[in-house]
Amino acid sequence: MTRLWLAAVCSETGEWMLQIALPILVYQATGSAASTAAMMIVGLLPAVLLSPAAGVLADRLDRRKLLLAVSVGQTVVAAPLLGMSGSAVWFGYLVMAGQASLAALFEPARNALVRDLVGPDGVTAANGLLGMGTNVSRLAGAWLGGLLFASGGITVVYLGYAVVLLVAVGALLKPFGSRHEPQPRGPAIREWLDGIDLIRRDRRLWVIGTAMMMGAVSQGLFLALFVPFVLDVLGAGAGGVGLLRGVQAIGGLLAGAAIAVLARRVAPRKLYGWGAVVFGVLGVVTWNGPHLTTALIVYIGLFIAIGIPGGVAVSGLLAILQTAAPSAATGRLMSSAIAAMALGNALGMLIGGLGAAWSPLMLNLQAALNLASGVLVLTARSAKHAPHAAVAEQASR
């Protein structure tokens, strides 16, 4: 598990480096906010478009070898950045598309491999550990991306990106002793449809899927409205935007420590439900706080606090998804969830952009969606409902 954690941290650190550096490059070259936003969309689409292939590959292949191939592939795909000039920004879009496409293959395989390594009873604690790694990656990758770009441009960023991915490759070279045994199967489209059928027949997945989509739309609203909130309402400037986004990772690290304590004491459903409820309540306090004060220190504390229930909720959600299907179908389930969340994010960004004139209402809607998603999961029947036997058998063949 330690080597998987290291590989995931390095992979996500590299992603953050490019997510920081490439939009800066595009904006400097074009001066266009629309072009910069297009870069973000290019990074989002592969999670949706490649969902069927990502899930099938995660279930068909040796998951460690798939992660290894993805890490090597990302290094190769980003290599054109070495010769990229400001006048050829379209290279940046191609690199972002290629990197995001490979990342779409990485996530389902990694999350499915967690269950293989620690078993169903250990996934919650493992997700807490991985969540801490994600926040370490966010802090390190964002800092490195900005620092390396400022010191030597996109070429230096690529060299740093290649170094962290090569560390990931090294962590993945040796077999893990995974419990997952890939087997020859029928047509890929049939496997994907079997995975969809598994979701359709399991009531638990309908409930968690609905809650997950509500949370994804909420996140999209946040992405669309956060910057105007900080700049126009708090008057904190560009530095405040970066600071408040960054300190959420501190809360995420604290959430990882909390998960280590709660993993064997609290069911994943309750972790997700109460995490989302507290996240929503803190959102209401944050968005309406300017009626009382706009002091930046107050919002630093609030955004650190928001990161804690957010991290707890994500760990609970992953644990539910990782244990809701047979191991042989976990990759397809995870890829479908990732695609659904990407669509929810896009919908939330669209709603937020169109409703920006009613920003206070939209921000409170963002908090309300999180609150409602948590209440939905907590009030749903908690009795275990096994997946339809025929579908589970078919999906695991």
Image: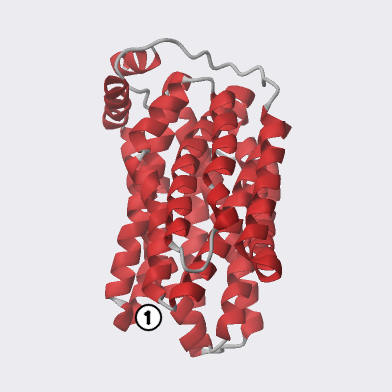
Q: Residue at x 67, y 29 (%)?
A: 172
Residue 393 lies in what quarter of the image?
A: top left
The x and y percentages for residue 316 are 53, 43
Colour option used: secondary structure
Dot 1 falls on a residue whose secondary structure is helix
Amino acid tagged 1: Pro
The x and y percentages for residue 390 are 29, 14
Where the C terminus falls, by quadrant? top left
The residue labelled by disc 1 is: 360
The x and y percentages for residue 360 are 37, 80
Residue 328 lies in what quarter of the image?
A: top left
Relative side of 327 to 333, left or right = right
Residue 3 lies in what quarter of the image?
A: top right
Residue nearest the viewer, comparing 81 with 337: 81
Q: Residue at x 58, y 16 (%)?
A: 179
The x and y percentages for residue 68 are 60, 30
Query: Quick check: 22 above or below 64?
Result: below
Residue 120 visible in the picture:
no
Residue nearest the viewer, comparing 89 with 19: 89
Where the N terminus falls, by quadrant? top right
Q: How many marks?
A: 1
Q: Residues within 10 Å of mark 1 (few under 14, many from 20)?
A: some
Q: Residue at x 65, y 42 (%)?
A: 165
Q: Residue at x 64, y 62 (%)?
A: 145
Query: Quick check: 243 above or below 82?
Result: below
Relative side of 119 to 39, left or right = right
Residue 275 visible in the picture:
yes
Query: Quick check: 11 above or below 278?
Result: above
